[in-house]
């Protein structure tokens, strides 16, 4: 698979300064709107590219350290390239004892990634999570906001096909 830095370089190449400035303008070019601006950047690129943050920093005169402070505080934001869909496999106790690791292993194999990585086609990012609040449905995983219950490794190909 491509390394995250290769993926980042590709996205950097694609990222246009005007696009970022437009997102800033849509939020009144107001430094009080930093969080909505970061949301808009995250939505557009699926993560917060460093050079986009530099543009925000320069244009709104906000120190990079402050922007990073906000970006790392909210789990919604990612500083690494992310896929279109995020798969979160629950590794909480109930799911773990019911075979969550087998689900992770199957996903790693099918997607050719490790946990925390993104597929070459930028479709999926694979993550693990603590209890996602569906213990009665263990083992469970989420793809974005959709919960999949009582998942068996043999279900993985079918589940992924919903998104490919
Ligand atoms: S432990 Fe997996 S949903 Fe609670």
Image (cartoon, rainbow, N blue to C red):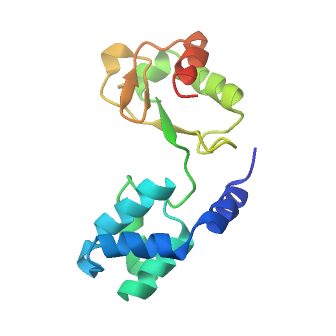
**The N terminus sits in image quarter:** top right
101, above or below 76, in the image: above
- Residue 151 position in % (x across, y down): 48, 14
Is residue 63 in sight in this rendering? no
Residue 14 in picture, x, y percent from top left: 63, 64
Residue at position x 58%, y 39% from top?
123
Q: Residue at x 38, y 69 (%)?
A: 23
Which of 123 and 71 lies nearest the eye of the viewer? 123
Q: Is residue 87 above or below residue 78?
A: above
> Residue 110 is drawn in which quadrant?
top right
- Residue plotted at (64% across, 22% down): 106
Q: Position of residue 13 (x, y in %)?
A: 67, 67
Q: Nearer the viewer, residue 153 or 158?
A: 158
- In the rendered image, the residue lying farthest to the right is 1
Residue 150 image position (x, y, % from top left): 43, 12
Residue 7 against residue 147 in the figure, above or below: below
Q: Quadrant of residue 92?
A: top left
């Amino acid at each position: 698979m491509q390394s995250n830095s290769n993926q980042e370089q590709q996205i950097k190449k694609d990222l246009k300064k005007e696009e970022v400035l437009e997102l800033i303008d849509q939020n009144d070019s107001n430094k009080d709107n930093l969080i909505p601006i970061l949301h808009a950047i995250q939505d557009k690129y699926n993560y917060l590219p460093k050079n986009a943050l530099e543009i925000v920093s320069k244009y709104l005169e906000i120190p990079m350290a402050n922007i990073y402070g906000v970006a790392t505080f909210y789990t919604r934001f990612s500083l690494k390239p992310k896929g279109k869909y995020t798969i979160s496999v629950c590794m909480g106790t109930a799911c773990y004892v019911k075979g969550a690791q087998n689900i992770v292993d199957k996903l790693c194999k099918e997607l050719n990634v490790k946990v925390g990585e993104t597929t070459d086609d930028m479709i999926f990012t694979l993550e693990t999570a603590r209890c996602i609040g569906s213990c009665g449905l263990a083992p469970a995983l989420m793809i974005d906001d959709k919960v999949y219950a009582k998942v068996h490794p043999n279900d993985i190909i079918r589940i992924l096909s919903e998104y490919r």
